[in-house]
Image: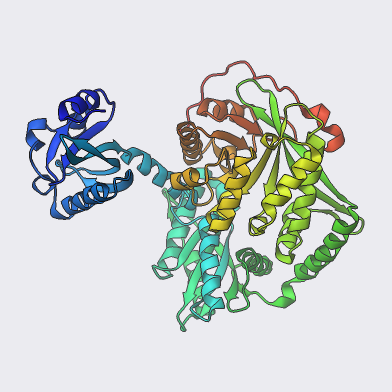
Amino acid sequence: MMQDLAGWSTVLELMPTAMFVRDSAHRWVFVNRMGCEYFSLNADDVLGKTDAELFPPEQAARFEAGDDAVLRSHEVVETEETVTDPHGHVRTLLTRKTCIDLDGAPHVLASVTDITELRESEAHVRWLACHDALTGLANRTALFSRLDAAIGRAASGGLRSALFYLDMDGFKKVNDAYGHLIGDELLVQFGARLRSVVGPDDTVARIGGDEFALLVDDHGDLDAQALAERILLLAGEPFDVLSTTTFIGTSIGMVAIDTDAVAAGELARKADSALYEAKKKRNRLVVYTKAMDAALAHRRDIEKALLEALLTREGLSCHYQPMIRSADGKVVGLEALARWRHPTLGVVSPVQFIAVAEETGLIGQLGEWVLRTACARVAKLDDLFVAVNVSAVQLRDDGFADMVMRVLLETRLPPKRLELEITETAIVNADGAAVQLLRRLRRTGVRISLDDFGTGYSSLTLLKDLAVDKVKIDRSFVQNATQAGDSAAIVRAVSNLGAALGLCVVAEGVETEQQRAFLSEAGCDELQGFLFSPAVPEDRIERIIGPYPVPAPVPAYSAG
């Protein structure tokens, strides 16, 4: 075992990363060639000097404290920090330190990797995922996150808020008459006017098309009617857009966020109900009242009927959509999707009945039935895996992992042929017990797929800590990837992240050959969407398992 500096120096000079050695007095005794290039310095400039002589006081103190911790514990310590190098450049460095013995004395051996570009790229992807690229305002994802926080404050007796939904009256006519360039600039200006009427801590969001939302805190002086009148006045003033003067109006629906508020989705639905009423006469504010909400009665009907369906299994079924390997068009798996047809309610949307199941505690029964049905069906097919969606509510059940293993045993489906799809938001909000539960399932061979990736709060830390196997790019980015530069950038960034971390990257919502070509070129490993097949009943699976040959090459698409 090497004990002298000369022996270590020979090895460290061959390392492809910056390496350095400091003694217990924090003096630099060695830095390799890569380290010199990395920090743009000569070895003679640092050898024999202390951190205090080379770096700002606060930075030197952190370095010295880290060295002391390693020398005391003899443990390997990995840290990530932002530092200013000798030339004044701010960098994010990943440093790994360990204690070595040189000539009978303890020293610190460290390797340094510059991950500045990686962190900046990650931050940019995160910004794009939470903001509307056109206006720079918050998007639906960010709005719902802040709505959850507002609900929590109101429920605990703290600050109350109000949610406004707005729709631009006459926008379509302007867009059709003058074109999308004028329309886009009009959206930007309208968003700026909304921003001007609320406080810096209030949220202004564009939630789709010409629909906007305001989340406004009530410090005891909020006059919703007065705020709405100010917005209506501003919206009615002419817009000077690219040498063109246009006129629009706006309709506004509002719901108060008080102690009765329970869920962001429910509040959004109420605000949307009020907006629907406002649009009947246009250019006015309508405040939500229970009298408007006929949908609540329908929701109660769904709850009662769903409970009966889970008891009798009548009307419930699983449909299956193929997942295609982009390289050769081979079907590698099927996603199982719950469907429900009721004798009197008709076809009930999964969005509706799954939300009801989550709120009423029926999601455990429904989830287990879907898992068992899907595993039993796909077990009859050679090689294909099955992907099953898992609700955030299911992850809170301590018995979830045991249930999954029991179903796999009873249906004789090997764990490696099951993928559990979990939304990014569900994982971010999951507690430690849920994360341990997922890790336990991964150890048995079950794969974990991160669904709707890019719409929440993705981070490399999340991917590393959970050790997921797959990320699934949300369809909203896929469908705009060949038209919108920001969507294309997100697709490429996620594909690059996936490749760097050894993850499979899936694109869902593929509908055109142009999208298929771009996604394949961008590095997506698997594809899913109507271009190949919609979800079909179990008796039609054999008709959709391909393969789906890769088309002849077309001129490369460049997302701008």
Residue 67 lies, with reference to residue 46, above or below; the image says below
Residue 360: x, y in percent? 74, 66
* Left or right of 548 in this view: 203: left
Residue 417: x, y in percent? 70, 34
User: Observer-nearest residue: 83 or 540?
Assistant: 83
Q: Quadrant of the N terminus?
A: top left
Inspect this view and state whether residue 430 appears. Answer: no
Q: Quadrant of the C terminus?
A: top left
User: Observer-nearest residue: 167 or 19?
Assistant: 19
| Colour scheme of the rendered structure | rainbow
Residue at the image position 12 percent from the left and 42 percent from the top: 27
* Left or right of 540 in this view: 210: left
Residue at the image position 78 percent from the left and 35 percent from the top: 378
- Please tell me in which quadrant of the rendered image residue 335 appears: top right
User: Total label count?
Assistant: 0
Looking at the image, the residue that sits furthest to the bottom is 220
- Please tell me in which quadrant of the rendered image residue 358 appears: bottom right
- Please tell me in which quadrant of the rendered image residue 392 appears: bottom right
Inspect this view and state whether residue 217 appears. Answer: yes
Residue at the image position 50 percent from the left and 79 percent from the top: 226
* Left or right of 294 in this view: 34: left
Residue 160: x, y in percent? 51, 78
Residue at the image position 44 percent from the left and 47 percent from the top: 461
User: Observer-nearest residue: 407 or 496?
Assistant: 407
Residue 201 lies, with reference to residue 369, above or below; the image says below
* Left or right of 209 in this view: 375: right
Residue 303: x, y in percent? 80, 64
Looking at the image, the residue that sits furthest to the top is 552
